[in-house]
Image (cartoon, rainbow, N blue to C red):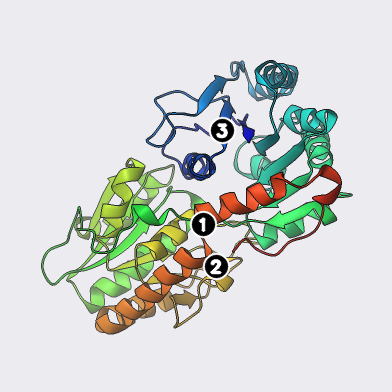
Amino acid sequence: MRLAYVCADLGVPVFGRKGCSIHVQEVVRALTRRGVNVDLFATRCEGSPPPGLDAVRVHPLRLNANGDCWAREQAALAANPELRAALDREGPFDVIYERYSLWSFAAMEYARDQGLTGLLEVNAPLIEEQAEHRMLVDRPAALRATRRVFEAATALLAVSSELAVYLERFLGTQERIHVAPNGVDPARFPVGLRPSHPGPPGSFTVGFAGSLKPWHGLGTLVESFAHLRRYDARTRLLVVGDGPGRQSLESDLTSRGLRGAAELIGTVAPEEVPGLLASMDVAVAPYPDLSPFYFSPLKVYEYMAAGLPVVTSRIGQLAGLVRHGDNGLLCPPGDAKALAEALILLREKPALRRRLGQTARAEVLQHHTWDGVAKRVLELATLPRCSAGVRSKETP
């Protein structure tokens, strides 16, 4: 099978270190492990392909990103004919797979017009996200482009049930939506991996990995860590990642007298993440009360694969993935006191930590791997266009 993977989003460097970048890499890597010949069409493909992607043929897409927001939006719309021409030039393909980006519709329309299966992976409600967190000038044009790509796709792969509900708002999508959450590569998280950044003997490390953005609950994390430090001073906070919230995070830690108890590692290469997770005793994802919560948090799947006890918010997909007291602990969103109490409990009960971590690892290795995602993609890819529109359950 020959598959064209398309990512026309300027915010996704496909060979980068962001969560969205890792998602692209892992899906492509899993497809190639299953014998699929993948051609990667991407706007941001600078740098060298990571290990396992050397055989992927890369086709850079040109996009003029200069000028103000309006100019960039219009340039992204104008890039559709070139994308279609590139697919036509480099084909033939058996399947077109695209990571949904705000202004791109040519790939799915090309698949439809050629009678090919067109699979559209949807990771976020991009119109709303762009308007709230960045800047969106031509909203009507963005909505028209989104309707075009949703209408043309054979199937839409939503990363969460909450996102599937969002997709159902668009006319004619209901019978073409499939839920395919994120996953892990078990080979990255072997049993007994040595910590790369261990704490002092007898210490207890609370860990967070991910981009430092407002919707990750960093304020709640710091407040709960302050409670924990008052209970036991032999605790440390290990933060892996970077982003716009770093300065605020450092200021909050400093104002509470906690800066010396926290280690902010910054952005690291994906191959460094497993050793850093092995350096944690517990991992947290303290999301605030976001509505809707459409995320499929990659960090939580990786925490669980690493055998860590997870403490996270009872919200969205996480409320189903993490079963309280079985494979992790759940807290009300934004509740620093409840988070601190969960951390204190885990500090005091190492046997509970081990049990939760072992159960969490077994859960994701059985039900949430990238190979499982690739298997589902290929099942959809082999269906004729007229048969792919059957609503499915979450990917096993």
> How many neighbours does mark 3 have within 10 angstroms: few (below 14), some (14-19), or many (20 or more)?
some
Asked whether the beta carbons under mark 1 and mark 2 sit within 8 Å of each other, the answer is yes
Mark 3 falls on what kind of element? strand
Q: Position of residue 148 (x, y in %)?
A: 83, 35
Q: Is residue 190 left or right of residue 121?
A: left
| Chain-order first, disc 2 or disc 3 | 3
- Label drawn at residue 297: 1
Give the residue drawn at x 41%, y 65%.
Answer: 304
Residue 179, compared with residue 341, is above or below; it is above
Q: Nearer the viewer, mark 1 or mark 3?
A: 3
Amino acid type at image mark 1: Pro
Residue 202, compared with residue 141, is above or below; it is below
Amino acid type at image mark 3: Asn
Give the residue drawn at x 51%, y 52%.
Answer: 370
Residue 272 appears anywhere in the view: yes
Where on the picture, by quarter, is residue 97? Answer: top right
Q: Which residue is mark 2?
A: 318
Q: Position of residue 266 (x, y in %)?
A: 31, 44
Of residues 197 and 153, the one nearer the viewer is 153
Mark 2 falls on what kind of element? helix
Q: Is residue 96 left or right of residue 286?
A: right
